[in-house]
Amino acid sequence: MRKKSYGIFLTSFLLLSACGGEEPAAEPEAETAALVNGSFSAELNGFEIHYEVHGAGPVCMVLPVSWGQSHEGMRGSLKGLEDHLTMVYFDPRGMGQSGEIETDEDMSMAAVREDCRALLEHLGLESVILLGWSNSGMNAMVYAAEHPEQVEKLILMHTLHYMTPEQEAELQELFADDVQALGELMQMEGSDEEKDAAWRVFFVERWLPKMVYDHDAHLGRIVEVLNNTDLSFKHNYYQETVDLIDFDGREACAQIKAPTLIIAGAHDIYTVEVLEALRDAIAGSTMVVMEESGHFSCIEEPEKFKSAVLDFLEIQ
């Protein structure tokens, strides 16, 4: 297994009149009916996909991470937006209440994008706000480039499109003990349940504290959200050994047409410098830096985070 994948993981963690006179009346523009809130499932691409709808207002599709996390992690962090937006979340194949995977490729970033596209069609949505965070932000860039007509606006939280070899080497050196521990974990043998449990311990107890700025104020809340979220060793293993090894989003970013908001944490493992490069790669994008945040600004600075999103979307 290539060591490079561990380094990328450590920087890729862990949200959519009638005319007068004698002339015939103009046809009114079609309007998308408001989505009904609740928990649902649909057969998409041959898989039973669980999705949930919460809130009211413009529709925001939350792209899930592909490294193995059920939707509760995203929803538990982004609930503050549900007073202003209709938030749509879904479980990736093999996670949460969605159907089991059939092949390894069902754990890929591409599979998440395919199911996102199918879910939009299922819901009768021609275009939405698309939100991606960390790993799912990387995937959201690609989706926005592949389906520009479906993305009205793009929100990228704590993510990156490319890391130079020098930046990656610096992070591997900074987190050398964690890279080694993760490498050993990825080689463990045992049942899926044993591997999932070991992966949860590593992620929550060892890696998560490095991603939060003020532990006393916010770490407990973030752990609580993740304790109610399924985590998958095998999904993460696939990401580490396949999708994330040579990820390069520069070409995708150059093709993005949607107005884009980039949210950075001043104390995140994704440095402001790295996200400034992302901002420069997406023409016309806007960047907001959360000065008191690590990787979880929606929990670490919830009011500032919400204001940044609503200002960008021009929602009062």
Image (cartoon, rainbow, N blue to C red):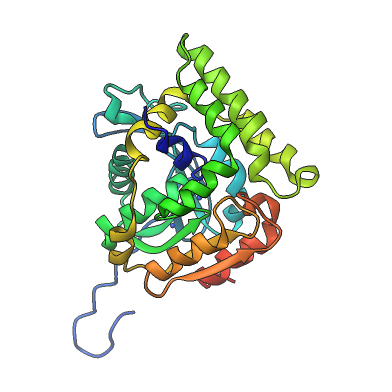
**Hey, which residue is sitting farthest left in the picture?**
23
* 100 to the left or right of 174: left
Name the spot of residue 180 as percent of width and height, x first: 54, 29
User: What residue appears at the point 52 percent right and 57 percent down from the top-left corner?
Assistant: 85
Q: Nearer the viewer, residue 45 or 104?
A: 104
**Hey, which residue is sitting farthest bottom in the picture?**
21
Give the vertical position of 309 relative to 35 (above or below).
below
Give the vertical position of 151 relative to 176 (above or below).
below
Q: Nearer the viewer, residue 109 or 171?
A: 171
Name the spot of residue 259 as percent of width and height, x first: 40, 70
User: What residue appears at the point 69 percent right and 61 percent down from the top-left corner?
Assistant: 303
Give the vertical position of 22 relative to 131 (above or below).
below
User: What residue appears at the point 56 percent right and 26 percent down from the top-left corner?
Assistant: 181
Looking at the rendered image, the quarter that the N terminus falls into is: top left
Does the image show residue 49? no
Does the image show residue 241? yes
Name the spot of residue 62 as percent of width and height, x first: 45, 48
Looking at the rendered image, the quarter that the C terminus falls into is: bottom right
**Hey, which residue is sitting farthest right in the picture?**
216
Q: Nearer the viewer, residue 217 or 207?
A: 207
* 27 to the left or right of 205: left
User: What residue appears at the point 25 percent right and 55 percent down from the top-left corner?
Assistant: 146
Name the spot of residue 83 as percent of width and height, x first: 61, 56
* 279 to the left or right of 151: right
